[in-house]
Amino acid sequence: MIQEIYQSAMKFAGEKHKSQKVPGTEANYLLHISNVAMEVMVAHQAKGDFDLELSIQVAILHDTLEDTETTYEELAQKFSERVAEGVLALTKNAELPSKKERMADSLKRVALLEKEVGLVKLADRITNLQKPPAHWSIEKINGYHQEAKLINQVLSNKNEYLNNRLAAKIEEYEQYL
């Protein structure tokens, strides 16, 4: 059942992200993770044309490789190869020299995989398009805005509901420019 899958992934993510905070806040990182998962669940409710079990696991685990000591092998063993592959695609390659190149590389890998992975990236950016932290420069805010547009464009065929939702969030975010 989806509840057990959700709870298992959330417990794993909670343990892995236990000391991480949502950037710019004192909130535990599980807030972000649960918001991404919620976006995926609402998208499935709007049009259930994707594998909810896969997408929920990828949503909950999407930052474990990038932000924790979790390994690909650990994800593949605990969850599945498909889940691990999805999380790996969403993980930026730290060896690439620039943030722009890391994003482009990740988006390219995400676009090649099944829609469940792409819609998690859309949900992730939707939840991240909140009021930017006070310490962000206008250049950083603008860059984040442009990245959101690129994500929506590159992943335009992954989930119509989330693409429309991200487009609306991008428009709202313009108030911070």
Image: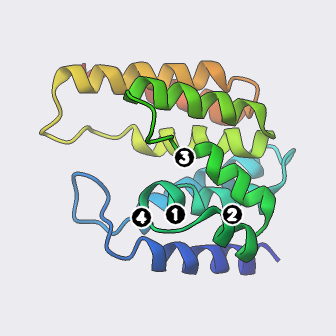
Which is closer to the viewer, label 4 or label 3? 3
**Any part of residue 176 in sight:** no
Residue beneath disc 2: 57
Which is closer to the viewer, label 3 or label 2? 3
Mark 3 residue type: Thr
Residue beneath disc 4: 31
Residue beneath disc 3: 91
- Dividing the picture into quadrants, the one containing residue 58 is bottom right
Q: Alpha carbon of mark 2 to alpha carbon of mark 1: how far?
A: 11 Å
Mark 1 residue type: Ser
Residue beneath disc 1: 34
Is there CB contact under 8 Å for labels 1 and 4?
Answer: yes
In this rendering, the count of numbered labels is 4
**Any part of residue 140 in sight:** yes
Image position, residue 35 (x, y; %): 50, 57
59 relative to 63 in the view: left or right: right
Image position, residue 45 (x, y; %): 76, 52
Mark 3 lies on a secondary structure that is loop
Image position, residue 29 (x, y; %): 38, 65
Mark 4 lies on a secondary structure that is helix
